[in-house]
């Protein structure tokens, strides 16, 4: 058999020229160059981005959208039972508008007793006045008789027919009579004064009932919450409802844990995400830090702003957070009236009282700033 037919042609060629020094060696296939070029472009892009790009360092907190950053309490100025509540959440009210009526049983009982006192004193005064007038007429008649008697006795004393002692005794009787008349008049005036005093007290009590039975709003705005209902007993200073001012802009009040919140400074950029809006679809509300509290908020400070212990627990837990007041940037061109990270934001209004989260950009770094320390460490180790 022919040996050339036992082997392939390529194998025979390799045996005939094993070194093949006259041919170029192929290191990478032509298709492999595409991958090399892609990796190279990626490395170049990554290098450029590490120099010119930015990485934002953010801190996050939960909070609420509030008009003016606070809600106002309307409280009862006195104790009583609520006869009726005249408003409901969402109602718009003005300063001085009557929002509830109180029934004050204790004050009504006092008025009833005072009227009874007036009736009793008036009846006693009438009966006493009739008796005093009768007695006063007797005293006056007796006084006239005494005056005539004194005149007669004075003539008799001049003639020596009567002693001066007898005359002085008669004059003493007249003096006692006049004194008794004065006491009767004083008693009548005193009775009239007592009736007048009690009548004045009754007028004051009736005015107090009229004034305190109506609860008037000291603020204008929109009712946010009504915390009582008809029939409830309320004390002086007891909270009846809360409202917000419609004249103030909506502000985001964000509460951030103290360790991270101390990094926040006025002017820092903030992205606010209301719970009623899908951030994945419409983006975030754009704002900036207006103020940040110097110290963690106390429970009393949180209650002054949020007015709701359950809400405070939901937003802050058991921690003492830093309060960050965020000024939302307005944009009349959007349906909500605020600037969003997307083009227009959601096709609806954003209302006060909405729970939200806030991301505050506290620092911006170049990506290469993270690589350089690692490179220095590596070089130092080598």
Image (spheres, rainbow, N blue to C red):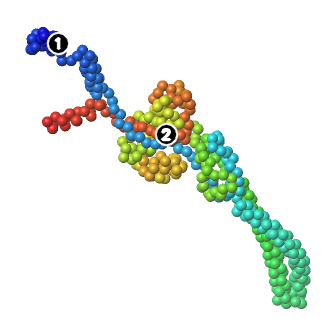
Q: Nearer the viewer, residue 258 or 380?
A: 380
* Secondary-structure class at tag 2: strand
Location of the N terminus by quadrant is top left
Q: Residues within 10 Å of mark 1 (few under 14, many from 20)?
A: few
Mark 1 vs mark 2, foreground winner is 1
Q: In the rendered view, would you say 340 is above or below 10?
A: below
The answer to whether residue 184 is above or below residue 283 is below
User: Image quarter for residue 131?
Assistant: bottom right
Q: Quadrant of the C terminus?
A: top left
Say whether residue 193 is visible. no
- Residue 302: % across, % down: 48, 49
Residue 26 rendering spot, x and y as whole percentages:
18, 15
Residue 8 badge: 1
**Residue at image coords 24%, 14%:** 30
- Left or right: residue 142 compared with residue 370: right
Horizontal and vertical percent position of residue 353: 55, 41
Give the left or right position of residue 224, taking residue 63 as reference: right
Along the line of sight, which residue is nearer the eye, 281 or 240? 281
Q: Secondary structure at mark 1?
A: loop
Q: Which residue is mark 2?
A: 356
Q: Is residue 112 left or right of residue 46?
A: right
Query: Mark 1 or mark 2: which comes first in sequence?
Result: 1
In-image side of 358 versus 176 (left or right): left
> What residue do we see at 65% from left, 58% from top?
233
Nearest to the observer: residue 259 or residue 139: 259
């Amino acid at each position: 058999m022919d040996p050339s037919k036992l082997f392939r042609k390529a194998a025979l060629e390799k045996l005939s020229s094993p070194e093949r020094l006259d041919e170029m060696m192929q290191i990478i296939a032509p298709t492999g160059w595409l991958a090399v070029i892609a990796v190279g472009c990626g490395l170049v892009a990554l290098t450029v981005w590490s120099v010119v790009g930015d990485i934002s360092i953010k801190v996050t907190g939960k909070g609420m959208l509030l008009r003016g950053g606070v809600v106002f309490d309307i409280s009862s100025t006195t104790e009583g039972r609520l006869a009726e509540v005249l408003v409901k959440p969402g109602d718009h009210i003005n300063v001085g508008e009557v929002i509830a009526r109180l029934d004050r049983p204790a004050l009504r009982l006092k008025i009833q007793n005072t009227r009874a006192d007036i009736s009793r004193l008036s009846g006693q005064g009438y009966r006493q006045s009739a008796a005093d007038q009768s007695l006063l007429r007797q005293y006056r008649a007796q006084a006239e008789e005494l005056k005539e008697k004194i005149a007669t006795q004075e003539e008799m004393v001049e003639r020596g027919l009567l002693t001066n002692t007898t005359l002085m005794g008669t004059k003493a009787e007249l003096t006692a009579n006049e004194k008794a008349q004065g006491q009767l008049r004083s008693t009548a005036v005193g009775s009239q004064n007592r009736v007048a005093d009690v009548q004045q007290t009754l007028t004051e009590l009736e005015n107090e009932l009229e004034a305190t039975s109506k609860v008037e709003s000291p603020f204008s705005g929109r009712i946010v919450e009504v915390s009582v209902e008809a029939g409830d007993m309320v004390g002086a200073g007891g909270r009846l409802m809360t409202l917000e001012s419609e004249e103030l802009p909506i502000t985001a009040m964000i509460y951030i844990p103290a360790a991270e919140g101390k990094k926040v400074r006025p002017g820092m950029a903030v992205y606010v995400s209301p719970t009623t809006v899908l951030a994945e679809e419409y983006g975030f509300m754009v704002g900036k830090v207006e103020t940040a509290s110097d110290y963690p908020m106390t429970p009393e400070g949180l209650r002054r702003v949020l007015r709701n212990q359950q809400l405070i627990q939901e937003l802050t837990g058991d921690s003492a957070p830093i309060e960050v007041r965020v000024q939302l940037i307005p944009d009349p061109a959007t349906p909500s009236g605020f600037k969003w990270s997307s083009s227009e934001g959601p096709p609806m209004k954003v209302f006060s009282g909405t729970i939200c989260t806030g991301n505050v950009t506290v620092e911006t770094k170049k990506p290469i700033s993270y690589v350089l320390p690692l490179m220095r460490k590596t070089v130092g180790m080598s």
